[in-house]
Image: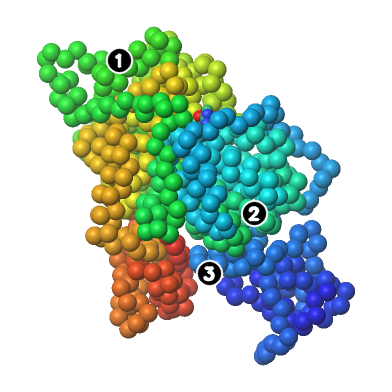
Amino acid sequence: MQEKKYLQVGVSAPIDESLTYINNDPSLDLQIGASVEVPLGRRKVKGVIVDSLEKYESNFKLKSISSVNTERPLLSKKFMSWCQWVSNYYFYPLGMVLDLAFPPLKKNSQRKTKHQVIPDIETSYQPDLTDEQQNVIKNIKDQKGFATHLLHGVTGSGKTEVYLSLISDCLDRGQSALILVPEISLTPQLLKRFAARFPDQVAIIHSQLTAREKTNQWWSAFSKEKKILIGARSALFCPIDDVGIIIIDEEHEPSFKQEEKLKYHARDSAIVLGKYHNCPIILGSATPSLESFQQAQAGKYFYHQMTQRVHKQAMPEAQVIDLKQERSGRTSETSNDSELPFWLSRTLYDHIDDCLSKKKQTALFLNRRGIAQLVICPDCSFVYECPNCEISLTLHKQKDLTCHYCDYSAVLADHCPGCNSIEIKPMGLGTEKVENDIKKLFPEARVARVDRDEVSNRHQLEDIIERMENLTIDIMVGTQMIAKGLDFPNLHCVGLILADIGFNLPNFRSHERSFQLITQVSGRAGRNPNDPGHVIIQAYNTEHPSITYAIQNDFNGFAKEELAMRNSLSFPPYSRLALIKFSSSKLDLLEQCVGNLKNFSQKVIGESVNLDGVRALGPSQAPLFKLKNIYRYHMLVLAPTHQKLHHFCKCMLQNKKAIFGNQVKVLVDIDPVNML
Ligand code: ADP
Ligand code: ZN
Ligand code: ZN
């Protein structure tokens, strides 16, 4: 029973502060951490009691709590402190963070769900660990309590086996284990490995579960009926007590950052959660983020390396094909390659052909969907554009034009809508075109495409994985959906159709991202101990560091060069970054804000000693300037420490009305990943 008279409640509403309510109903059990309903204006909202006070001075007559929500379990102080950190760090109301800690539906132990969430599987026993695996496990176990470990192991070095061993240890201590993986890697392949080692111990949470499934899984982890929770980033918010280890697999993955609402980074938030639980955090990757790598170099994280594949398989042989030379070669008279589509080199063609004849599989990777990104008229330069976004429409099928941002669609006409010319042409390349061309070139091959147009849900992806496994697919064409986590022993040849895509994206991480993708995609080949596999990388800019270091498996070389660059520009990890985004349908209003924000930034940075070394870049038009009829501007803020960064953002938000008025939407994205 709560004795104190005043209760502070984090309410599920866009209000930054907790609100104070009076406790004058002795029948209510109002403990800290309890979920309640409270009056807010004329409505009632959900909330969580975060604190209680003996005294409270108020000019208003305080309202009382309406009811206690006993459906929702009590939150621990430890967990709420972490939520408070998340709220402060990412500028998101505490009550709305707390709201994420609960499942979507009420608990209902009676109802069984239709699908089986965890695959049935025979128990398997641990293999003899390699020396590298044993070393890493020992070194991690040597550190008691909170510690962040970066596990840097090449693709196929047996990182997952290390996780399994550490989890087993954690369960022996009676504690729960939390494992976060990118949504797309939550495949049956991965779940089977966990379920086989720990039968009846695994709960999972990801976005494709129904609300009922999610609720059941949540309760089984929360109640400790299942001691292992594997999930996409949101699983972090399951308020499990006594977590003994947190593992972030593929820690470099951009998808750990949520882009809307609470713009949190699950990896960074997990490290803070680990502090509260006083447990180890394992960050695993074959291509660590430069943030994590730099922390390891600075001695803040423990660094563990695994340099060899489990069966000492060689890394696949990688070959780079210069598409500039291919093109000039083709126009020469001796060339007989006029039959090949423009995107396909003779070398890659030969390898696909060879794989087919040897009954081995090929994967072709291109990080672009559709047939063409641009339909343009060479006579009048008319381009099909989205009327809602300043974006050209992408061609799909034969005649379907769609906007990849707002789903606007149109039909391709035979004549140019501008000048009636019949020369209007699709330009560019996408997975759909690659698939079409491949089917024409190899009519006997069984081809599957894996991208968001073709594979819209988990079951479809699982189906394709199964067909890859039982060898009823010869050639898989896909976007980054096929880049990670998949392990197919019969996959021999991996082709990157155009490695240059992504080199010049307007994002300071574009080289890092390209390096990671090239390494990860290449790592899909040669999983079989008896077959080293082959990787063919087609590119125009063949000397690009993202390619040259990736093909030599030289992460350290790449990191050194890229970190030097970041350092010289004072970009992360050598500074802290926030992206201030502001948008409106009214361009004139927005342009006024540009001047206001610029003046405000100069003034506040110049005047405040707490903002020494803070830099504001912009404001400028966002790379995607108009989306869904909304105009968008943004400003980058770089600061030597996150305290200074937060101080700047706080000052700006306090002056929000004066800078932006009431009709412009303003968002602060701390440690942004997507800069479009
Ligand atoms: P990573 O996660 O580093 O890519 P995995 O843990 O998936 O690597 O290991 C790659 C393959 O090697 C998997 O099929 C796994 O079952 C197997 N494996 C891992 N460790 C061992 C070991 N010590 N002995 C035999 N096989 C192993
Ligand atoms: Zn025209
Ligand atoms: Zn659009």
Give x and y (percent) for residue 372.
34, 33
**Towards the viewer: 111 or 439:** 111
Give x and y (percent) for residue 96.
62, 64
**Towards the viewer: 319 or 327:** 319
Name the mark on residue 88: 3
Mark in front: 2 vs 1: 2
Name the mark on residue 350: 1
Q: Mark 2 to mark 1: distance in Å?
A: 52 Å
Q: Can residue 57 be seen in the rendering of this structure?
A: yes
Quarter location, residue 164: top right
Q: Mark 3 to mark 2: distance in Å?
A: 23 Å
The residue at the point 48 percent across, 22 percent down is: 489
Give x and y (percent) for residue 94.
60, 68
Answer above or below: position of 22 versus 69: below
Instruction: Look at the numbered disc 1 and give the secondary structure of its residue.
Output: helix
User: Which amino acid is tagged 3?
Assistant: Asn
Q: Which residue is mark 2?
A: 243
Give x and y (percent) for residue 539.
25, 32
The residue at the point 49 percent across, 43 percent down is: 136
The residue at the point 26 percent across, 22 percent down is: 345
Q: Residues within 10 Å of mark 2 (few under 14, many from 20)?
A: many
Q: Are marks 2 and 1 in contact (CB under 8 Å)?
A: no
